[in-house]
Amino acid sequence: MKRIARIIAPVVVIGLGIGIFVVLDLTKPEPEQSDEGPRPLSLFVDKVIQDDVALIVSTQGEVRARTEITLVAQVGGRIARVSPEFTEGGSVAAQEPLIWIEDEDYRLAVTQTKARVAAARVGVEQAEADADVARRQLRNVTNPSPLALKKPQVAEAHAVLRAAEADFEQARLNLNRTRVSVPFTGRLKSKLVDVGQFVTPGTPLGRAFATDIVEVRLPLTDIQLASLGLPIGYIANGDAPRVNFSAVVAGQYREWEGRLTRLDASIDSETRLLYAIAESENPYVGGIGSGGMPLAVGLFVKAEIEGRYVEQAYLIPRNALRAGDKIYRITDEGRLDVQEVEVVHQADDYVVVERGVQAGDQVVTSSIRNPVQGMAVEAVIRGGSALVLNP
């Protein structure tokens, strides 16, 4: 009896469970039917602005001296003395001696050549006196020879005098060259010699650069050249475009002013870029916004160049421009419209375009993984416009 109960009990339990499941399945409520289609994709948008704008071309480059020279000895000798400013970073003034080369030999040469000049002048006077005597003696002779009249002797005496005077001037010039200076006010970049060293003509002594003007060589793309509105080979004549230089120096943001003076006459064959030269006057005085910090040679700076003025331009946020110069626009029907535009200018925050947009159009600024022409989308406007102009 117990054995029969153990066999029947599991069968009864299984049957009961199946019955309950069937009852619940038959009595479950029907699911509600919805006629809603797929929800459109929400995208951040910004509106196209139409406004007059002064284009600003952003690029960067390294500050370098417009004038930089190598000091070279023109005469030989031992260096007797150097200026306290003859050191790296030293301030040098125009025509102020930096190096003194021993000049005793050159002073003696000046004395010797001066004596030869005096002797040559006596020789000229003697030759002219002899010629005068010869003319008197031969005044009754018909067609006397130049040699008899002492004319070659007089010419020779004058030639000896001119040679002596040239040697004297050369000796004085060599004496002056024992004091080495630069022809401009500037700074010393490096020193290669010091007191006691013997130098020969042609020995490099150091390098110096002028501090009246520095220049920055700035690379430009073709679209940046178009934004400037200047021709290749441009040379400033009068009012040159303004350039604003900026950099972080000593932990602070600094600014300096300059002018665009010229564009190269050829395009670099390796980079396919055109280079411009911008200059800044009195860089070591410090300009507005520099906090007294000089626009030092070797500093890497960002440059913003004043470009051409465009009236009634279409402007969109920089992040609305897609690869291949395309934008995603949302139509009034809530559909995605992929448009190709012509880019006129690109700045840090905005892009100036032509064709394909109108003022007030909603352009997508958020990323889309798989955009499809005509797909249903929903525009989401941010709290504030992402478009910031730099007039």
Image (cartoon, grey):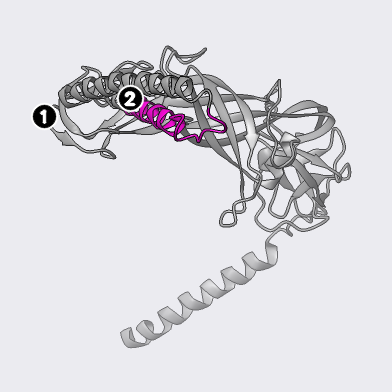
Q: Residue at x 49, y 34 (%)?
A: 146
Question: What percent of the width, then of the height, locates residue 391?
Answer: 70, 22
Q: Residue at x 58, y 24 (%)?
A: 244
Contact? badges 2 and 1 (CB < 8 Å): no
Question: What percent of the width, then of the height, locates residue 178?
Answer: 25, 25
Vertical side of 39 occupied by 192: above or below? above
Image check: 203 left or right of 222?
A: left
Check the image and name the residue furthest to the front. Answer: 140
Residue 80 badge: none
Residue 348 visible to an observer of this rendering: no
Which mark is nearer the camera, 2 or 1?
2
Task: Give the labeled residue for mark 2.
Answer: 173
Q: Is residue 143 highlighted in magenta?
A: yes
Question: What percent of the width, then of the height, locates residue 334?
Answer: 84, 45
Task: Give the labeled residue for mark 1.
Answer: 196
Location of residue 258 (image quadrant): top right
> Secondary structure under badge 2?
helix
Q: Which residues are magenta?
A: 141-169
Number of numbered callouts drawn: 2
Question: What percent of the width, then of the height, locates residue 227?
Answer: 73, 37
Vertical side of 199 occupied by 130: above or below? above
The mark that comes first in sequence, 2 or 1, is 2
Dot 1, crowdedness within 10 Å: few (<14), some or many (≥20)? some
Vertical side of 36 occupied by 288: above or below? above
Task: Tell me the CA gap for discs 2 and 1.
Answer: 23 Å
Dot 2, crowdedness within 10 Å: few (<14), some or many (≥20)? some
Nearer to me, 369 or 178: 178
Q: Specify the principal SS of the magenta part.
A: helix
Residue 260 visible to an observer of this rendering: yes
